[in-house]
Image: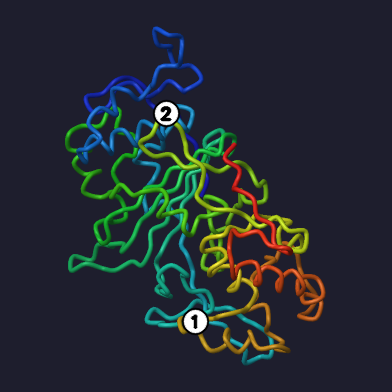
Amino acid sequence: MHGSSSGGSGAGATGGDTSTSSADASTTEDGSPADPCADACVEIDADAGAATCHACRCKVAFDGWLPASDELQCADATPIVTYHADLSSGSTVLEPAPINASSCANPSLLTGSCRPGSRLGRLEHDDVVVQWICRDIALEVDGSALFHDVAVIGHNVRTGATCFWDDVDDVTHEDDLPPLDLAEATPAELERHLAVFDLVDPGVCTKCHDHDPFVYTPYLASTGWVSVAQDKGPYSTVSLDVLPAAVDASHLVSDAAAPCLACHRLGSNNTCGRFAGDAMGLNKEGYYEAEVREAAEPGSPHWTLAHWMPTESLPIADYDAWLATFGAAREHILGCCASPGIDSDECRWAPVPAE
């Protein structure tokens, strides 16, 4: 889902004026740039102060914009479809998985869930992309939808600055996400924000989001996924500090891995630890249905069920062609990921570029 909006400005009781970008900030007496979030970041030891400071830092990093509350709701996001692979005709036919499915062709690699009803949303505003995911829906007694987990990622593709928001589990419905922008938040809006969003250390998020702010897996195949990974742009994280910080990860730059690095970087944290092997048809866990695990066996005519890199944007005729193109790179990556981030005679790593 795409959209745009204009950011608000002005000073509020919770955080001061955050509408000025860092490039336009006034200067201090010694001529150095003033901190545009100085007023918002006074009481960061308190939950309200930390949330207000984080909101200000992110708004500045996003060129004076954060999405409005009515733009960013689970109800406005695109449904995520989990599938069952029907192989009875000899070809691969994907059909929506049943409601009670405990395994499927494209489970969530975070939760292992195949439950239908999750959603992924996307907004674009100039250089800023915001995506949010609402996972694992349940129905309350009154019939309202409740999501087990909701998370938001914002990324400035020009500068690399990235913000993460994660909700407290089992508190978010289809239309009650609070505002991210707290500059003019009412006391009730601030209270709701604190009840929903749990301020997290960005380093927790970059354990999985280690080479790019947005991570694709086949779980998101139905959403019309739009990638920023192919641009291999800068990537840094925003917290309560004045400046964005480099991601605590390396990415593989060995020439031998080049066939698998043409469209994206490969990070040394969970991309190495989990995603890379899964994408190459390895280590399929129990929440994958039997059809996928069998498709991972050498010679399976349904091999594309188990191998999801490259995506359909680069079609490969058959498994032999895949192996001829990517087999040597796969072995190199697996060898390097056994000691992620550590240079050797064969493996070369570099810091994820922050700017």
**Residue at image x 22%, y 37%?**
45
User: Residue 278 location in percent, x, y?
Assistant: 58, 73
State the separation of the CA atoms marked 2 and 1. 44 Å
Name the kind of residue labelled 2 in the image.
Gly
Using residue 336 as the reference point, say whether residue 209 is left or right of it.
left
Using residue 164 as the reference point, say whether residue 264 is left or right of it.
right
Residue 323 higher or lower than 166, as above or below? below
**Residue at image x 47%, y 79%?**
97
Seen as rendered, the residue at the extreme front is: 345
Residue, disc 1: 285
Residue 31 higher or lower than 346, as above or below? above
User: Residue 344 location in percent, x, y?
Assistant: 68, 62
Using residue 209 as the reference point, say whether residue 300 is left or right of it.
right
Relative depth, front residue between 299 and 178: 299
Residue, disc 2: 7
- Identify the mark at residue 32; answer none if there is no mark: none
